[in-house]
Image (cartoon, helix red, strand yellow):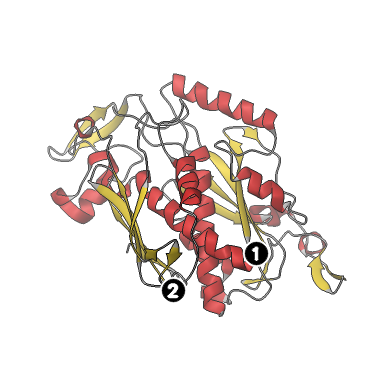
Amino acid sequence: MNTWGERFKVSIFGESHGKAIGAVLDGVPSGTELDEEYIKMRMDRRRPGKNLMSTTRVEGDRVKIVSGFVNGKTTGTPMCGIIENRDMRSKDYQGELMRPGHADYTAYVKYGESRDFRGGGHFSGRITAPLVFAGAVAEQVLKKYSVTIGTHIYRVGDVYDTPFDSVSTDINALNDLEKMDFPVICAEAGEKMREEIDRSRLSADSVGGILECAICGMPAGVGSPFFGSVESRLSSMMFSIPAVKGIEFGRGFGFAGMYGSEANDEFYIENGQVKTRTNNNAGINGGITNGMPIIFRIAVKPTASIGQTQNSIDIERMENTEIKIHGRHDPCIVHRAASVVSAAAAITVLDMILGEA
């Protein structure tokens, strides 16, 4: 399925080497003023071809809004945004050779010879561009709810950034991160991360990492127990991003080594507001927000396309073979994925908030 959401629904379409990709947004509140320059800025952060840390494929990624938007405001009817593909090299792809780490084989099993294998087709990370467009719209709607979202690169290879302060997350710092092409809290860590990415590029390899996202300003009481939990909804959306292989909220897997006396977040009242002294549970209890910042981390695997020779199969001949992937690919996608994570979080949060209305 390519549609997600209950009140704010997002449908994505297109292929990496097709004529265009895009999204249809249903449930955008009418009368919302949208800053198209803001949408452009968000798209530019994810856009490929800007430096050696990214694929050399050059795409403008300008969104053409063709419905649901008149005179600077949303109409309340479905909004469709289209992004043209311009810089494709389909000759770099061979449909019979299954690329390790990609969806080539599973797509062949599910869709057969009719699948579009060029650049990964609909499975390509290129399809996250429409998600960023949808997120840029959602972020502007969320302003009326005073919700702020920010994501930084927490890890690349074995290099770590400074983590968020989960109790007193700085909203201004989140806004600053969202303006950076390489969002990190510690500049020195950022330089070391860039060096790690460059080493993988020069070795015809790739490297993975972790992104940390903070959502501030969420009121208490949003979400539902069990299947409608905040964790369930965010996880569902995050795992729709290609290359995401893990997620943890708050202390996450660290809870396994803690005692209850350490893990529990004790409550207190300050100026008539309920708060917790720690935020190990990421602002969520029983699947429902408690008013503290929502903090989560996602693991992003190394880019599957690398320049080294690998073992594979020829699906047409049903023979073992070797493959050396050609084309233009990112040595690391973590820094470009940061904007996608923030967008995906905005989509999810808006859907949950509208569901409480």
- Examine the rendering and report whether any part of residue 263 can be seen: yes
Residue 54 position within the rendered picture, expressed as x and y whole percent measured from the top left: 44, 31
Res. 121 mark: none
Report which quarter residue 142 is drawn in. bottom right
Q: Amino acid at mark 1?
A: Ser
Residue 261 position within the rendered picture, expressed as x and y whole percent measured from the top left: 82, 63
Res. 6 mark: 2
* Residue at the image position 45 percent from the left and 25 percent from the top: 52
Q: Which residue is mark 1?
A: 146
Classify the position of the C terminus by image quarter.
bottom right
86 lies left or right of 58: left
The answer to whether residue 295 is above or below residue 197 is: below
Answer with mark 2 or mark 1, whichever residue precedes in sequence: 2
Judge depth for marks 2 and 1 and give the one in front.
Answer: 1
Q: Residue furthest front?
A: 71
Q: Residue furthest bottom?
A: 357
Residue 85 position within the rendered picture, expressed as x and y whole percent measured from the top left: 28, 42
Pointer 2 local density, CA inside 10 Å: few below 14, some 14–19, many at least 20? some
